[in-house]
Image (tube, grey):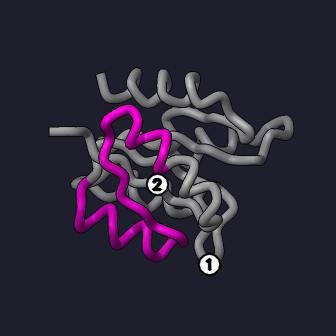
Amino acid sequence: MSKRILVVEDHEDNRQILRDLLASADFTMIEAWDGEAALKVAAAERPDLILMDIQLPGIDGYEVTRRLKADPALRAIPIIAVTSYALSGDEAKARAAGCDAYVTKPYSPRQLLAKIREYLA
């Protein structure tokens, strides 16, 4: 059975890129377009890994990550921040919220898949 990855991303174009990339690597993609949906989908679907955008409508990715990591049933799911936030201190802020890894946009598809595989190994 293929690993299931929840992609939390508000831009359809970015979700389509990830849809194609993850399908090419035999992953199953689950989608959420905002923070509220991410919390509901993560609880219902229990994905193997989450790719989390930080800049989301409503609840931002930092807060979604904090809530997921506070839930005993969900805290073991690895969360990789995939964000355009690339200023000094942004990675530390993502890690402080509970993200296990941090990838900046634009990213190398090969490097992103390597990071995903590292956390699913």
Give how far across and how far down residue 12 sits, in percent: 60, 65
Up-down relation of residue 34 to residue 83 (above or below): below
Task: Characterize the local packing of mark 1: few (<14), some (14-19) or many (20 or more) Cα atoms within 10 angstroms.
Answer: few
Quadrant containing the N terminus is top left
Give, as a three-letter code, the residue at label 1.
Answer: Gly
Quadrant containing the C terminus is top left
Along the horizontal axis of the image, is 15 left or right of 71?
Answer: right
Residue occupying image coordinates x 68% and y 47%: 83
Q: Which secondary structure lies at badge 1?
A: loop
Residue sticking out furthest to the left: 1
Give how far across and how far down residue 98 sits, in percent: 50, 44
**Disc 1 marks which residue?**
58
Label 1–label 2 contact, CB within 8 A: no
Residue occupying image coordinates x 42% and y 62%: 31
Task: Characterize the local packing of mark 2: few (<14), some (14-19) or many (20 or more) Cα atoms within 10 angstroms.
Answer: many
Q: CA distance from mark 1 to mark 2?
A: 16 Å
**Disc 2 marks which residue?**
7
38 inside magenta stretch: yes
Which segment did they paint magenta? Answer: 19-46
Give how far across and how far down residue 105 sits, in percent: 72, 41
Viewer-proximal residue among 59 and 72: 59
Q: Which secondary structure lies at badge 2?
A: strand
Residue occupying image coordinates x 85% and y 35%: 88
20 inside magenta stretch: yes
Quarter of image, res 16: bottom right
Give, as a three-letter code, the residue at label 2.
Answer: Val
Give how far across and how far down residue 56 sits, in percent: 64, 67
Along the horizontal axis of the image, is 59 left or right of 1?
Answer: right
Residue occupying image coordinates x 61% and y 44%: 82
Viewer-proximal residue among 89 and 18: 18
